[in-house]
Image (cartoon, rainbow, N blue to C red):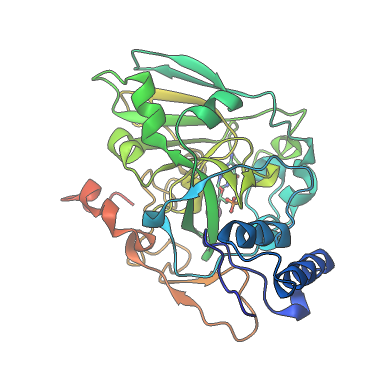
Amino acid sequence: MLIKRSPNGIDLPYGSEITPREIFESRRSFIGKIAAGSIASGALLEMAAREAFAQTPGAQKLTAKLNPAYNSVDKQTPFKDATTYNNYYEFGTDKSDPAKTAGTLKPRPWTVTIEGEVKKPMTLDIDSLLKLAPLEERIYRLRCVEGWSMVIPWVGYSLSELVKKVEPTGNAKYVEFVTLADKAQMPGLRSPVLEWPYVEGLRIDEAMHPLALLGLGMYGEVLPNQNGAPVRVVLPWKYGFKSAKSIVKIRFVSEQPKTAWNIAAPREYGFYSNVNPDVDHPRWSQASERRIGEDGLFAKKRKTLMFNGYNEVASLYKGMDLKKYF
Ligand SMILES: Nc1nc2c(c(=O)[nH]1)N[C@H]1C(S)=C(S)[C@@H](COP(=O)(O)O)O[C@H]1N2
Ligand SMILES: [Mo]
């Protein structure tokens, strides 16, 4: 393969033995165009990368500039893997369930209500959220507590942009994320595996950290339903379950909010849930992980890094015993 990486960091396809036909076809036409000398610019390379990753048919594309501070040297997880191996219990507990059943989720029209300890409570629709701040592409690793990880080019902006708009009061110490719980759209709600709605939370200084992303898209288009359409958070230094999908309400509160996995198994899942290879889950080690998309028979496990490698958040937890506050 001549071209490994597009200007915005999207890996071009490789390994023809696993290349679906559409990708092969678009790559062939793209290479044909290069050979004919008709294209050479970065913009066209980018177009070809997008085309080669033929994503959700008809999905709205999002234009976002790669923020170089959040690029990654790791190879990106193929779109196909990122959208067929999911945890989204509202659509079933099997990794393959959400891709099959989340078609019933209606991501538009959609509103997010922001309330509680704020001077300017508001309800925003998705178009307003898409315009609230410049969209950035950020390539983040996300590490699931189950011991696997992915590398995904998200589209969104820092959650702090939204927080600043609503002007939290002095009493706002925590932020609670409430996600959609609609039986008509979500077959998984019939099972009491978690308390619905799925809720998550952050301390306000965690929510204000620039790394905390309000996610509106991935791979250059709006979020696929199974990845949390139309709006979620992405908190790459925490275990994946903190990154709540399909958010309908953001509440600013004075007390630490309850969170779905902490309610379900408090000994196993704490409020902080920072990625920490030194604190094992009571039932398994957290020292290593496998990277989805490269887990062949001979693929080596990767060492899990403190804060998933995002050391810039360390100052948020200065002086805290992270074994106690797991
Ligand atoms: N509402 C909701 N959000 C959720 C979940 C869920 O079941 N429901 N699963 C979490 C878990 S355990 C993980 S690992 C990530 C997975 O995100 P992805 O499927 O986009 O990789 O979503 C998190 N957000
Ligand atoms: Mo997870």
Of residues 34 and 297, the one nearer the viewer is: 34
Give how far across and how far down residue 139 sits, in percent: 48, 56
| On screen, residue 192 above or below 4 | above
Of residues 131 and 217, the one nearer the viewer is: 131
Give how far across and how far down residue 304 sits, in percent: 41, 69
Image quadrant for the N terminus? bottom right
Q: Quadrant location of residue 161?
A: top left
The answer to whether 109 appears left or right of 197 in the picture is right
| On screen, residue 56 above or below 194 | below
The answer to whether 180 appears left or right of 318 in the picture is right
The answer to whether 76 appears left or right of 91 in the picture is left
Q: Quadrant location of residue 212?
A: top left
| Residue at the spot 79% in from the left edge and 67% down from the top edge | 29
| Residue at the spot 59% in from the left edge and 64% down from the top edge | 77
Kindly tell me whether residue 302 is visible in this rendering: yes
Of residues 102 and 198, the one nearer the viewer is: 102
Give how far across and how far down residue 314 sits, in percent: 25, 54
